[in-house]
Each structure stands twice: as C-alpha cells, then as structure tokens.
Image (spheres, rainbow, N blue to C red):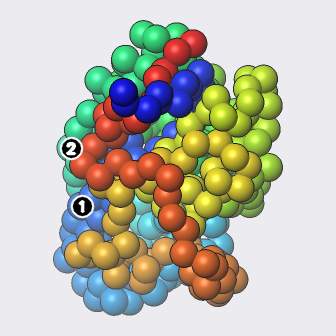
C-alpha cells in the first residue's frame, strides 16, 4: 500500500520564479530598454548600467518606475526636460516587452484552480514591491485565485510625487479586485520565519497542515523548514545560472550588505528540500492531499 500523503489545508507560495518566470520577463524587457536607450541617447550601456545601479540602490528595488529621470547622463542630455518624456520610446519598449514576456509556468493555473476547488486557501508571499507584484498578478489572471498577497510596500517616490501622478490609464487598470493585498514591514527580507509563521497563525493552522513552495533553497525552503511547515523546492524556477543573469547583478539594487548577507546564507549547511518540483508546479498535487 502506498504511504498516505500529508493532508494540506493551506498553501503558501512564493511568486517570482515560482509561479511565473520573473527573470525572463525582467531580462527581456530591461535589456531591450537599455539597448534602445543607449541608441537614442548616445550614452554607452556600460555608463547607464553603473548609474542605474546607484539609483536602484537608493530606492531598494530593481523595478524603480522613475529610473530614467534620475540618471545623470540622461539629465545632462535633456536640457531641463524629463528624461522619461524625452526617451519615452525606450520606456515603451520596456513596457511592450514586459507585457509580452510575463506568463505562468506550465501547470500553475491548473494546479491552483484544483487546490481552490478543494477548498484550500492560497496565500502568496514575495519580497517584490507592491505595484509590480499587483501588475503581474493581474496580467497572469491570478486576481481572485490567490486569496491573500503579502508583499513589500512600494518604493519611495521623490518629494511631491505620488503613485497617482504616474498613472496614465483608467483606475480599473490598477490594484487588485478580489485578492486581498497586505504589506510586509519595510526592509524585511526572506528568509523571515516570523512573517511566514504569522501567516500560518492567521489561518489558525498547525505547521503540519501547511505547505510552502519556492525556488530558493536558502530563502524559501530553509524558512519553511525552520517553522516546521512542509517545504517544496521549485527547482524548475532556479535562475542564477541562466544566461543574462550578470546584467541583473550589474544593475541590481543589492547593496554591499545584501551581498554579504547572501554570502552568509551560502555558508550555511546545505539545505536539503523535503520535496522537489523538478519540472512544473502541478507536481505538488501528487505530493499532498489538499483538503479544506
């Protein structure tokens, strides 16, 4: 007789590189924008990359909406005009490729639909900032499929600028309709067992009734193991060794402290996942008995 599968009544999942290919979307759109921007401005990509890194570091994200306005090389080229307006064609390239490139991994939609059909709540927990996380959830059709989203708040804006000032589309194009969105404390990064533990407590679940899935062994799997929930490594989403990852390193917001933190995590004993989804997200349906 086959062993009984663990019974799960709450699914908690990472988002980027777990439900969708964030790295492909980011690299495709950012590299296209960078090439177009260098052609339009005459500023070498290497110079732009260094300036972009500094701006990203100031705001703590690689998805800063006002990036072009704060690049010194572009500001000097624009004679007092806003670089975002002068180089709007490059921004259009970024947005066009980003929209074309975001899609769910194979098996995600069918698996999440089945989990919900069985009465099991779905919670998402991500380090990514609020605005772009909401955008990706809308674009992938997960608004209402995910019950509650936990994300970092949005990045800071320059004095006198609000998110509403940047909006070009009708109100219904922003935010989430059915998924409840809650913010994690500013600056709190994974692995953060306290936040995952609070999510479990909010649903009044015992750890053995919860599964957490994510693509990072050190941030996701180790965090899940620390509080005793079932862990699944989304190995299909690992991106650090993929072509183009060096561009992310060159322009990322990661500070010296962040890099040292990554090194400390890497020096930890090897994290061995209890379960591994090798090819697609829907493998979790064969690992557990989901029952609300």
Q: Which residue is mark 2?
A: 100
Q: CA distance from mark 2 to mark 1?
A: 9 Å
Horizontal and vertical percent position of residue 5:
47, 30
> Badge 2: few (under 14), some or many (20 or more) residues near its Cα, within 10 Å?
few
Horizontal and vertical percent position of residue 82:
47, 62
Q: Which residue is mark 1?
A: 28
Helix, strand or loop under label 2: helix
Q: Which mark is residue 45?
A: none
The residue closer to the viewer here, 132 or 210, is: 210
Residue shown at 32% from the left, 37% from the top: 283
Residue shown at 66% from the left, 34% from the top: 208
Residue shown at 35% from the left, 48% from the top: 277
Query: Disc 2, disc 1: CB below 8 Å?
Result: yes
> Badge 1: few (under 14), some or many (20 or more) residues near its Cα, within 10 Å?
some
Residue 91 placement: quadrant: bottom left
Relative to 122, say whether 74 is above or below. below
Q: Is residue 204 visible?
A: yes
Horizontal and vertical percent position of residue 176:
53, 23
Relative to 253, say whether 236 is above or below. above
The residue closer to the viewer here, 263 or 79, is: 263
Residue 60 placement: quadrant: bottom right
Relative to 286, say whether 151 is above or below. below
Horizontally, is 42 left or right of 142 in the view?
left
Q: Is residue 153 visible?
A: no
Comes first in the chain, label 2 or label 1? 1
Helix, strand or loop under label 1: helix
């Amino acid at each position: 007789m086959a062993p009984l599968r663990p019974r799960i009544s709450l699914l908690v999942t990472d988002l980027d590189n777990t439900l969708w290919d964030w790295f492909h979307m980011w690299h495709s759109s950012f590299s296209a924008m960078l090439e177009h921007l260098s052609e339009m401005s005459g500023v070498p990509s290497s110079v732009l990359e260094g300036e972009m890194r500094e701006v990203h570091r100031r705001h703590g994200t690689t998805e800063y909406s006002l990036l072009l306005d704060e690049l010194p090389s572009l500001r000097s080229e624009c004679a007092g005009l806003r670089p975002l307006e002068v180089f709007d064609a490059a921004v259009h390239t970024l947005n066009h490729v980003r929209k074309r490139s975001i899609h769910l991994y194979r098996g995600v939609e069918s698996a999440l639909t089945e989990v919900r059909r069985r009465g099991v709540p779905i919670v998402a927990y991500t380090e990514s900032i609020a605005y772009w996380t909401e955008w990706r959830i809308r674009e992938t059709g997960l608004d209402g499929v995910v019950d509650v989203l936990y994300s970092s708040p949005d990045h800071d804006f320059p004095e006198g600028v609000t998110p509403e000032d940047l909006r070009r589309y009708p109100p219904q194009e922003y935010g989430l309709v059915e998924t409840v969105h809650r913010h994690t404390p500013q600056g709190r990064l994974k692995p953060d067992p306290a936040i995952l533990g609070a999510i479990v407590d909010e649903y009044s679940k015992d750890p053995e009734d919860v599964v957490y899935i994510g693509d990072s062994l050190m941030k996701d799997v180790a965090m899940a193991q620390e509080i005793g929930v079932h862990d699944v490594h989304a190995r299909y989403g690992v991106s650090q060794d993929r072509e183009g990852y060096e561009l992310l390193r060159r322009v990322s917001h990661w500070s010296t402290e962040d890099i040292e933190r990554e090194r400390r995590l890497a020096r930890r004993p090897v994290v061995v996942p209890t379960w591994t989804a090798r090819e697609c997200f829907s493998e979790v349906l064969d690992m557990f008995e989901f029952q609300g």
